Image (cartoon, rainbow, N blue to C red):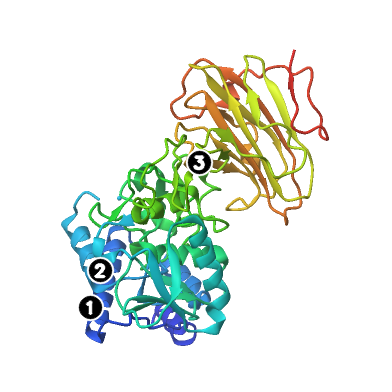
């Protein structure tokens, strides 16, 4: 027996534990058909992007170390496919049709009141907290089940997983050991109909899949959805979605997902908070008929289904119609509105260990663009930023901006697509360092990508700067 086969035998004999998962109302024959389809998908994707012998060994080692997520019944790591969903998926893949984020099939949509039961006491805390989050941001309510046939069952099984949409019967959402609140909300959003963000049909414009770093037989977890399987409701791709994979998902080493715009690399994979676009998709799907007269909300906001007299606003914005910059929560941030002129101005956010947000809207005259340089920052660098400077430079201010927390961000020059830019400086309580220096001014040329080669840029001499300790005050340089 070859050394490679011995390694495989040893790993599967002593390390691999497989969890059997099925939906309540499906037969064993249906589940076996789903497994067969998933095996076909794995084989097809592995055939398109074959693993090297080295990666096959690393894949087995990696999977043996992560037995909590090891189940042949889970698609994309945390989704239980129903038989119709699996059949639709394999049909679309095999037909090679041109490859949208919430389920289109109306039969998979819940009513506004969703019955549930908590089966395992160990799942209670996360179940109740995730329900509180969803109810606070949507028109949906969750009620304890009486005799409803279709309902959600919160269970405590190894790992975190859910079905996508209403699939019938008592469908499980697992909140096992290691599930955070963000992961729990992620699973509830699956049950409400959201697929993973990187599975969108247009994802190749925004992320690259690095197949050479993906575990063997896990490449099917990166298949795109068809337009008849899901719907983005016309919303732009959201790197900050709670539904987005992290850079190292299913890796044997190195990133498996790479943002096309590299500045978003440390934004993807966050599990800290539900994004504005996540809740907007749910509200557009379930709550459009709640408010009879929609408000003329600005910046991509929409009428709040929980308060029809108020818009629900993108991060960093506030006011009845989202016309105002949101008030900062961090002490000594200074004012929220700044005017960009032709002379560079410096904005310091001083060293602190407190938690909070400084939020700014920088405006240039109509027809001009705001240009921003991050010249100094002292955040903790993580694969996915927890404390960061977030810059919303796109025309669409409802989309999560790119978040900077690592050294490569220093010297970035960012130009807004229109005459406004939103900057959010976010600091988590546990972060050890926090200091930021921003320089901004206006420019008259439009830069479609928002990216410039700052190494070729002639730097403005700054004879006068505001020093740390006097935060939120701008100074013009001579």
The mark closer to the camera, 1 or 3, is 1
Q: Which residue is mark 3?
A: 262
Residue 112 image offset from top left, x and y in percent: 37, 63
Q: Quadrant of the N terminus?
A: bottom left
Residue 33 numbered tag: 1
Residue in front for this viewpoint, 128 or 368: 128
Q: Secondary structure at mark 2?
A: helix
Q: As drawn, is 11 to the left or to the right of 35?
A: right
Image point 40% across, 58% down: which residue? 196
Q: Which residue is mark 2?
A: 86
Give SS at disc 3: helix
Instruction: State which tag comes first along the sequence, 2 or 1.
Output: 1
Q: Are marks 2 and 1 in contact (CB under 8 Å)?
A: yes
Q: Gap in Å between the C-alphas at discs 1 and 3?
A: 40 Å
Residue neighbourhood size for the residue with mark 2, other residues' Cα within 10 Å, grouped as few (<14), some (14–19), many (≥20): many
Across and down, in percent, residue 323 comes to 53, 33
Name the N-terminal-most of marks 1 and 3. 1
């Amino acid at each position: 027996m070859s050394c490679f086969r011995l390694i495989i035998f040893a790993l599967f004999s002593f390390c691999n534990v497989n969890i059997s998962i099925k939906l309540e109302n499906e037969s064993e024959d249906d589940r076996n058909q789903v497994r067969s389809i998933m095996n076909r998908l794995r084989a097809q994707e592995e055939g398109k992007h074959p693993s090297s012998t080295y990666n096959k060994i690393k894949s087995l080692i990696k999977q043996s170390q992560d037995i909590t997520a090891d189940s042949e019944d889970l698609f994309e790591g945390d989704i239980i496919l129903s038989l119709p969903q699996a059949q639709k998926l394999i049909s679309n893949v095999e037909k090679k049709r041109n490859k949208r984020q919430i389920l289109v099939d109306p039969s998979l949509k819940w009513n506004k009141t969703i019955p549930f039961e908590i089966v395992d006491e160990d799942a209670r805390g996360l179940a109740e907290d995730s329900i509180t989050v969803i109810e606070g941001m949507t028109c949906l309510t969750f009620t304890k089940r009486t005799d409803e046939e279709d309902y959600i069952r919160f269970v405590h099984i190894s790992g975190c997983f859910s079905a996508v949409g209403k699939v019938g019967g008592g469908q499980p959402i697992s909140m096992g050991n290691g599930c955070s609140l963000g992961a729990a909300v992620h699973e509830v959003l699956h049950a409400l109909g959201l697929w993973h963000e990187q599975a969108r049909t247009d994802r190749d414009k925004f992320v690259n899949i690095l197949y050479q770093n993906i575990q063997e037989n896990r490449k099917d977890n990166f298949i795109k959805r068809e337009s008849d399987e899901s719907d983005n409701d016309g919303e732009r791709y959201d790197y900050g979605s709670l539904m987005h994979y992290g850079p190292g998902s299913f890796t044997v080493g190195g990133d498996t997902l790479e943002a096309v715009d590299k500045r978003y690399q440390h934004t993807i994979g966050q599990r800290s908070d539900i994004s504005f676009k996540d809740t907007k998709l749910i509200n557009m799907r379930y709550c459009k008929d709640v408010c009879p007269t929609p408000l003329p909300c600005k910046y991509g906001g929409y009428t709040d289904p929980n308060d029809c007299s108020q818009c629900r606003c993108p991060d960093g914005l506030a006011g009845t119609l989202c016309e105002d910059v949101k008030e900062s929560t961090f002490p000594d941030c200074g004012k929220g509105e700044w005017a960009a002129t032709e002379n560079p101005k410096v904005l310091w956010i001083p060293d602190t260990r407190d938690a909070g947000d400084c939020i700014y809207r920088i405006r240039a005259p109509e027809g001009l663009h705001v240009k921003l340089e991050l010249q100094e920052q002292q955040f903790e660098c993580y694969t996915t930023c927890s404390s960061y400077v977030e810059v919303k430079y796109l025309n669409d201010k409802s989309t999560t901006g790119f978040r900077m927390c690592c050294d490569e961000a220093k010297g970035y020059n960012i130009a807004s697509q229109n005459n406004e830019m939103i900057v959010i400086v976010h600091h988590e309580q546990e972060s050890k360092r926090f200091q930021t220096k921003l320089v901004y001014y206006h420019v008259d040329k439009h830069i479609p990508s928002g990216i410039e080669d700052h190494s070729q840029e002639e730097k403005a001499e700054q004879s006068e700067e505001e020093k740390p300790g006097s935060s939120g005050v701008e100074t013009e340089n001579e």
